Image: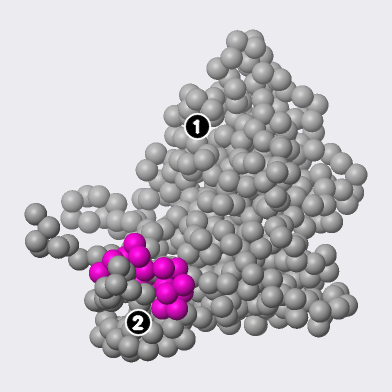
Amino acid sequence: MLTIALIGRPNVGKSSLFNRIAGKDLAIVDDRPGVTRDWREAIGYIFDEPVNIIDTAGLEEADAGTLTDRMRERTMMALKKSDLALFIIDGVAGVTTMDEHFARIIRKSGKPVFLVVNKADTKAARERLAEAYSLGFGDPFFVSAAHGLGLADLYHAVLEKLPSKAEAPENDDGFVARDDFNLDELEGNLDFEFTDAEDLSNKPLKVAIVGRPNAGKSTLVNTILGEDRLLTGPEAGITRDPIAVDFDWKGTKFQLVDTAGLRRKAKITDKVEKLSTQETMRIVRLAQIVVLVVDGVAGIDKQDMNIAEHVVREGRVLVLAVNKWDAVEERSLIQKQLPEMLAQVLGQLPGMPVVYLSGLNGKGLDSLHKAMLDAYALWNKRVGTGSLNRWLGMMESRHPAPMVSGRPNRLRYMTQIKVRPPTFVLWCGRPDDLGEDYQRYLINGLREKFEIAGVPIRFNLRTSKNPYAT
């Protein structure tokens, strides 16, 4: 599959073109420069041909070691990985000195390059179209990524760079056989979309890494991958776009998704941060496993518990990872306080897995791997209807449901209707009068009897229709 890197100065429209080719709004787009800070990949389509598209941070010159300098290094890494580069310039601004400088650098890379003049639908851009030829990349392509104009010529040129189909075997009808088309591989890169009804046996487990800013999420992902895939640094809030990375970890396929740090809602005033937060919430909603990374040195605060509560409401597997454990001095105090905090906020989720680790040096990663797989297995657990109803009869005989107007509120029947998370339905005489205390009694009994600790359980009540009602 052809890999295409989108390269250019900040705010020339790389993310807009990335979204256009990907066919969905994956990258955050804003008028301000520098919104994209790290490169990310997605499967897109040039007409009907799948391609791997890479969005990158804007190229800028900066002092060594600064965030801008590290962003530039990440862009050059993406260029090195690509088969084709689309060098994008702003048609309104025309060719700038910085465009000329980075054009020389890209030319030295030896990669095939197409020059794309974006925002070419404006009057100001049409007056400066001739300037694009001065960069020496041949005939430029004049497009508007935001409005989808002028892309056909660019797409046809990209198709010419695809591997030749002449050598592919043909079937009896004369159509080219697509032996290299791997649907599982494609769907595994569709940026975190799946439904509960899917067969997940051959697909990677979707793991969202979430937490407050500067908790060490990107560092943890890099350590798991064994490479500096994600941009990290001492600055808080470096990650803005969620970045998904496929990885085989001890024989299990994972798709790790690094997300933007989540601050309290009242503190979020910046538009880009709002968009980043919305994307993180979307990733949580579509994940299977959520690893909540908390800063053990800074301490666990209310916002960490708010995030945990949201994950549980979404019904996702939640694993709490206490990071920077090697630098924590009062370990016994945290280990004592943490269960109390979890009991107050997540009282309905006893036994939630907690792992103490260091994302910097890799200590505790084996425990994290085991905790995720164990919790995932429970998340998929199914209990037989016969066993459920025998257990229900025992629970009712031990502690009958409260009376309603002097009459028993009979528990008639119970079954599990789905997994991920385990969801149970109880039919009873008067569901509206079955109090929360009694429901907790049943849920806690479910967890204890069938060993479903540490994952969310959904418990629904229904009543049978009265055949004599009419």
Mark count = 2
Distance between the Cα atoms at labels 2 and 1?
A: 72 Å
Q: Tell me if mark 2 has few (under 14), some (14-19) or many (20+) residues whose alpha carbon lies within 10 angstroms of its own.
A: some
Residue at the image position 25 percent from the left and 85 percent from the top: 386
* Above or below, 171 relative to 51: below
The quadrant of the image that shows the C terminus is: bottom left
Question: Could you say where residue 227 lies in the image, as x and y percent from the top left?
Answer: 71, 67
Question: Could you say where residue 330 lies in the image, as x and y percent from the top left?
Answer: 86, 78
Residue at the extreme front = 406
Question: Could you say where residue 28 lies in the image, as x and y percent from the top left?
Answer: 61, 40
Q: Please name which of the two marks, 2 or 1, marks the residue nearer to the observer.
A: 2
Residue at the image position 63 percent from the left and 15 percent from the top: 125
Q: Tell me if mark 1 has few (under 14), some (14-19) or many (20+) residues whose alpha carbon lies within 10 angstroms of its own.
A: some
Residue 318 can be seen, yes or no:
yes
Residue at the image position 28 percent from the left and 75 percent from the top: 408
Numbered badge on residue 361 = none
Q: Which residues are magenta?
A: 421-442
Q: Quadrant of residue 23?
A: top left
Mark 1 = which residue?
154
**Coloring applied to the structure:** one colour
Label 2 amino acid? Pro
Label 1 amino acid? Leu
Closest to the observer, 3 or 202 = 202
Side of 262 where 182 appears, left or right: left
Mark 2 = which residue?
400
Q: Quadrant of residue 124?
A: top right
Among numbered discs 2 and 1, the one appearing first in the sequence: 1
Closest to the observer, 240 or 177 = 240
Mark 1 secondary-structure assignment: helix
Side of 280 where 179 appears, left or right: left
Magenta span has 434? yes
* Above or below, 348 relative to 193: below
